[in-house]
Image (tube, helix red, strand yellow):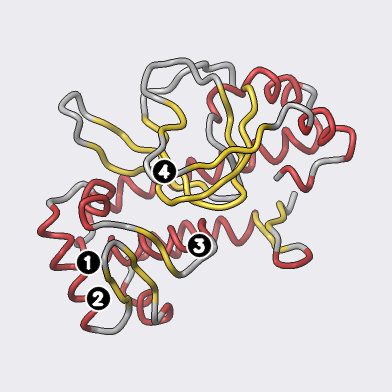
Amino acid sequence: MLAQLPDADYEALARHLVPVDLPLEKALSQPNRPIEYIYFLNSGLISTDAITVKGESVEVGLIGREGFSGLPALLNQPQMSHVVIMQGNGDGFRIRASIVRELFLKGGLFQQMVHAFAYLQLVQVSQSVLCNRMHPVEHRLARWLLASADRQESEAMNLTHEFLAQMLGVQRSTVTVAAGDLQRQEMIEYSRGKIEILDRPKLTALACECYGIVQSSYSRILGRGPNDSIHYVL
């Protein structure tokens, strides 16, 4: 997203960007607290999770290099009800939300990209509601692994069964059985918290239709620029 900005807009942000390491499970914003910073990724994976009063959570949205954390702050909503955390180790840039909002309010290309990104997040959240209610865990796990790999742009991911269970809103034992089935069918390889997709076509065939529905929106809005970089089609 930053790479697509006109030079003047990029320079307005660049002097405020702070390089940061973003380790697994680092919280980028907390429920009902001010969103002070926005984070743009170079690598890694951001997860937006809905949380109950008992601390139970389920993942409702994924963000990679195509977007950023802290979207509500640009829409004049200084806080949100969900937690936003790093789901995979990475790095990127931190910048105060107020500075990014100033650029957003000027309109232009950046505002268009933010609107497109907000739409993609809405597609994810809406489809996740249906998926979590209607589809078997094994199909949901396949969808989630594919979506995570797409956003992270890597077939290898650092994910524990405990974390997968939290993201899918099921018991850890349920994920262990489902992941074991995928591994026996040679769709994935799982070892010591690392999962690698071995057979994407087979895993895609197993995934519920939610993966295809969401991915078609991403394919339509996100093209590929030079060196396979993400490029918004506006």
Which residue appears at 34% of the width and 68% of the height? 195
Q: Earlier in the sequence, mark 4 or mark 2?
A: 4
Q: Are marks 4 and 3 in contact (CB under 8 Å)?
A: no
Element marked by disc 1? helix
The image quadrant where one finds the N terminus is top right
The residues bearing labels 2 and 3 have C-alpha atoms spaced at a distance of 18 Å
Where's residue 169, x and y in %? 21, 46
* Three-letter code for the amino acid on which mark 3 is drawn: Asp
The 10 Å Cα crowd at callout 4, few under 14, some 14 to 19, many 20 or more, is many
The residues bearing labels 2 and 1 have C-alpha atoms spaced at a distance of 8 Å
Please state which of the two labelled residues, at mark 2 or mark 1, is closer to the viewer. 2
In the image, residue 105 above or below residue 28: above
The 10 Å Cα crowd at callout 3, few under 14, some 14 to 19, many 20 or more, is some
In the image, residue 202 above or below residue 126: below
Report which residue position mark 3 lands on: 150
Q: Earlier in the sequence, mark 2 or mark 1?
A: 1
Q: Are marks 2 and 1 in contact (CB under 8 Å)?
A: yes
* Three-letter code for the amino acid on which mark 4 is drawn: Ser
Where's residue 10, x and y in %? 81, 36
The residues bearing labels 4 and 3 have C-alpha atoms spaced at a distance of 13 Å
Q: Nearer the viewer, residue 144 or 183?
A: 183
Q: Earlier in the sequence, mark 4 or mark 3?
A: 4
The disc label shown at residue 182, or none: 2
Q: Is residue 144 left or right of residue 230?
A: left
Report which residue position mark 4 lands on: 47
In the image, residue 127 above or below residue 203: above
Which residue appears at 36% of the width and 22% of the height? 31
The residues bearing labels 4 and 2 have C-alpha atoms spaced at a distance of 23 Å
Q: Residue furthest right?
A: 8
Report which residue position mark 1 lands on: 138
Q: Are marks 2 and 3 in contact (CB under 8 Å)?
A: no
